Amino acid sequence: MTLKLLGILAVACCIFAGCRGAPITRAELVGNYIYKSEDSSSRATDHEWDHLTIQADGKYDLVQGGQTKPKTETVGTWALVSWGGIDNGPSISLGHAGYPIQVKGGQVRLLIDEDTGIWYVKVR
């Protein structure tokens, strides 16, 4: 095979298998996250107070709420896991909820709903 064909095959395999850069570590997940939605409307939101703190000791603190939703706080333990789903990518487990992890453009994103563009984001 030619070198060009091998390069094309390598890229195709990478796309098919969902290649990633270096795996994310627990230390990279620690920090403060804010709620992000690609819906840029200026109406009142249920999520304006949402923020998540992930601590190095394995605990998390999630505050949720906004003008149209009462403020709540949930604390618990978190873990870095691999769900073995379609993309076999890493996820974070917050209590009983799991969020796929995406590293994009210098940001760590915990995907709430990737289809509608909703996630918690921490700038690296």
Image (spheres, rainbow, N blue to C red):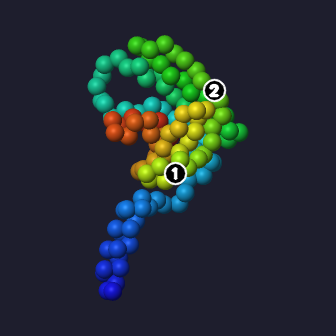
| Count of numbered tags | 2
How packed mark 1 is, by other alpha carbons closer than 10 Å (few <14, some 14-19, many 20 or more), is few
Q: Report the residue marked by disc 1.
A: 84
Q: Earlier in the sequence, mark 1 or mark 2?
A: 2
| Residue 95 screen position, x and y as percent | 61, 32
The residue depicted at 52 percent of the width and 16 percent of the height is: 71
Of the two numbered discs 1 and 2 in the rendering, the one whose residue sits closer to the viewer = 1
Dot 1 amino acid type: Gly
Q: Cβ–Cβ below 8 Å for labels 1 and 2? A: no
7 with respect to 100 (left or right): left
| Residue 14 screen position, x and y as percent | 40, 65
Image quadrant where residue 55 sits? top right
Dot 2 amino acid type: Val
Image quadrant where residue 75 sits? top right
Image position of 40 with respect to 106: above or below: above
The residue depicted at 31 percent of the width and 80 percent of the height is: 5
* Label 2: element kind: strand
Front residue of 85 and 71: 85
User: Outermost residue toward the front?
Assistant: 85
- Residue 21 appears in the rendering: yes
Point out the image quarter for the N terminus: bottom left
User: Outermost residue toward the bottom?
Assistant: 1
In the drawing, what numbered circle is on residue 5?
A: none
95 with respect to 66 (left or right): right
- Residue 108 appears in the rendering: no
| Residue 65 screen position, x and y as percent | 48, 19
In the drawing, what numbered circle is on residue 75?
A: 2
Task: Tell me how far mark 1 sits from mark 2, CA to CA.
Answer: 26 Å
